[in-house]
Amino acid sequence: MVILEAVSFGLAVFIGWILFDYSREKKWRKEKVVESFLAGVCGAIGWTVIELLF
């Protein structure tokens, strides 16, 4: 269950981050997609760690 929540949170971070970058630059850039993906992965890992600690 924790993993499903973490993946959902990571996906939400990825989508939010990529939409925010697109709204600023008005074009898709490969670097921004990779940055958004890494932000989503870090968010999912952070969510998992917090859930396991508390």
Image: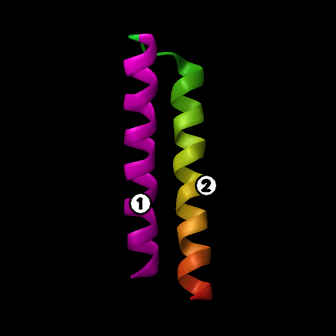
Does residue 11 lie above or below 36 as drawn? below
Q: Quadrant of the N terminus?
A: bottom left
Mark sitting earlier along the chain (1/2): 1
Judged left or right of residue 3, residue 50 is right
* Location of residue 9 by image quarter: bottom left
Q: Is residue 7 magenta?
A: yes
Does residue 12 lie above or below 24 as drawn? below
Task: Please give the name of the residue rendered at 41% of the width and 29% of the height, measured from the top-left corner.
Answer: 20
| Percent position of residue 38, x then y | 60, 43
| Percent position of residue 35, x then y | 59, 34
| Percent position of residue 2, x then y | 45, 79
Q: Is residue 4 magenta?
A: yes
Amino acid found under the numbered disc labelled 2: Cys
Dominant SS type (magenta): helix
User: Which residue is identified by label 2?
Assistant: 42
Pick the front one: 19 or 33:
19
Highlighted magenta segment, given as a residue range: 1-25
Mark 1 → mark 2, Cα distance in angstroms: 10 Å
Does residue 50 lie above or below 19 as drawn? below
Task: Please give the name of the residue rendered at 57% of the width and 45% of the height, measured from the top-left corner.
Answer: 39
Mark 1 neighbour class, 10 Å CA radius: few under 14, some 14 to 19, many 20 or more:
many
* Location of residue 25 by image quarter: top left
Q: Residue furthest front?
A: 24
Task: Please give the name of the residue rendered at 51% of the width and 16% of the height, measured from the top-left corner.
Answer: 29
Amino acid found under the numbered disc labelled 1: Phe
Judged left or right of residue 15, residue 10 is right
User: Which residue is identified by label 1?
Assistant: 9
